[in-house]
Image (cartoon, rainbow, N blue to C red):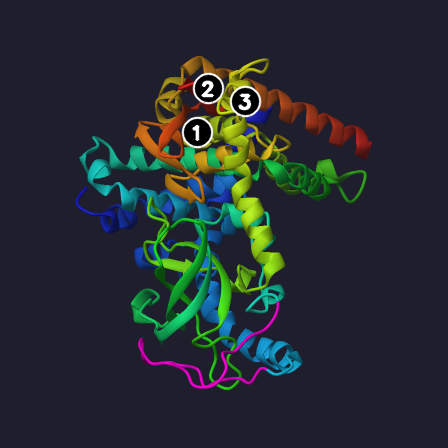
Amino acid sequence: MESLEGLLAAHGAALLRLALMLTGSSDSAQDLMQDTLVKLHRHWGKVSRADAPVAYAKRVMVNEFKRQAKRRSNSSAVLVADAHQMVAPPGGDAFEDQVADRDRLWSLLVTLPAAERAAVVLRFYEDLSDTQAAELLGCRPATVRANTSRAMSRLRKRIEIEREVTS
Amino acid sequence: MSDLEDQLRGLFRDKESQAPLVRPLSEYLSNRGTALSRRWQWLAVPAAVVVTAAVVIGATQLSSLSGDTAAPVVTGSSSTAASGSPVGGHGPLSNSEAVTCVDQYSPEAVTRRSFAFDGTVRSIGPGTSNGSEGSSLGLAVVTFDVNQWFLGGTQTTVTVDMGKPGDEDPTYSVGTRLLVAGEPRWGGFDPLADAITWDSCGYVRYWDQQTAQEWLDNTDEWVSSLERDPCWMKGLSSGVPDYAAPRPVDETPPIELAARFVEGTGLDKQYPNGRLVVADVGESTQAIWLVSKDRVVGEFRYRYGEYGWEIESLEHC
């Protein structure tokens, strides 16, 4: 890859989509994209020599996402509360509506710890194997499996709670 | 494949179409974007607000002064002197309440800035910092005679980018004594590299003894704590799992400060009697050196692991 401009032109849309899946909102996705590009820009010499600059960029993005999530940990209680408010269904039969279900699932995703959300996004959005996701995250495949499993379990539990509330 | 897994895959497919559009690289790397990261918004804030704030502050604050006459403000030159009494006031230089800041001013928050000093304006020149595509940020280049450093420097004069003082009701002039804090515009190790003040968030204030003392007390605190117990870092790794250690929320100030600095990519904070250096020392690894009175009194290394930042090693304790 010759330049950061080239990487952005060829893979910017894919990186922004990944940022959206990680953060859950367009504004936050642009924030994450910017922080990622600033880092890539600062270390372009190293990035450009990487075998797969796009994979490198994704790795930077996911790490940056986790780092920012940690930084926001002081306000996580508020975020979780907001998310629960968002997922509170308007009526008792809301779960019959598939669109509403997806909106709620999207909102629930935001409440996951960053490492678990990253694992879910890499596994089910990027469609990576445990090993590939582990390489990108810089951890062991078992960790990816554990985080994915914890995330799925957490989501199921929360969906169940939502269902109980609506029934 | 489980139902939930199917739902997630479908959800992600749906959401793909809602991804925002890619912006030009220059927007990501400049401070112009309005929906981009808070860091860059901060830098853009002075340009958008200072002119308005100058009028508001000028009208409300300067009119309340007794005996202070607004002197002509030196603009367009970096070496001319103002005539008459310097502009003065009380409180923040800019109307910081008009701006949403992620780290609004408080005396404690000054410790999170890269530089902070008590200085008297020596000269005001035209701004040289521009946004992307050459758009002006409406900043002035202001040189100060430094009366006292709280953070980030030792020299007797310093030049920073700052909001313009305004033409009709200037908020400051040559001779105005201010308390000033800010950041290197592009981050990095040198706190004064392309230094820019955070006036719109309340970090530039008219000098008064009480506020200056608050700044000194707060910026001095962690070094004092460090001197009392240079090995306070050891407490981080005992009794709690490593992955939980760098959770600083309710810890004592030194731990909280250090953990926050770890998040930077490279920092060198100078305090009145010590400095703290944070640097990348390897893939996903950062080191913090605590230097007090010209000797390293502590070193610890963090690695970005699966649970976030984890302590890797502690030295000099």
Closer to us: mark 1 or mark 3?
3
Residue B272, image quadrant: top left
Q: Chain of mark 2?
A: A
Circles 1, 2 touching at the beta carbon (< 8 Å): yes
* Relative image position of residue B128 (x, y in whole percent): 31, 69
The residue depicted at 25 percent of the width and 51 percent of the height is A5
- Labels 1 and 2: the sequence-earlier one: 1
Distance from Cα at disc 2 to Cα at disc 3: 22 Å
Which residue occupies the foreground of this view, B132 or A85? B132
Tell whether position B89 is magenta. Answer: yes
Label 1, label 2: how far apart the Cα atoms are: 9 Å
Drawn side of residue B15 relative to residue A165, left or right: left
Residue B30: percent from left, percent from top: 35, 58
Amino acid of disc 3: Ala
Q: Identify the residue under disc 1.
A: A122
Say whether mark 3 and mark 2 are on the same chain: no
Q: Is residue B1 visible?
A: no
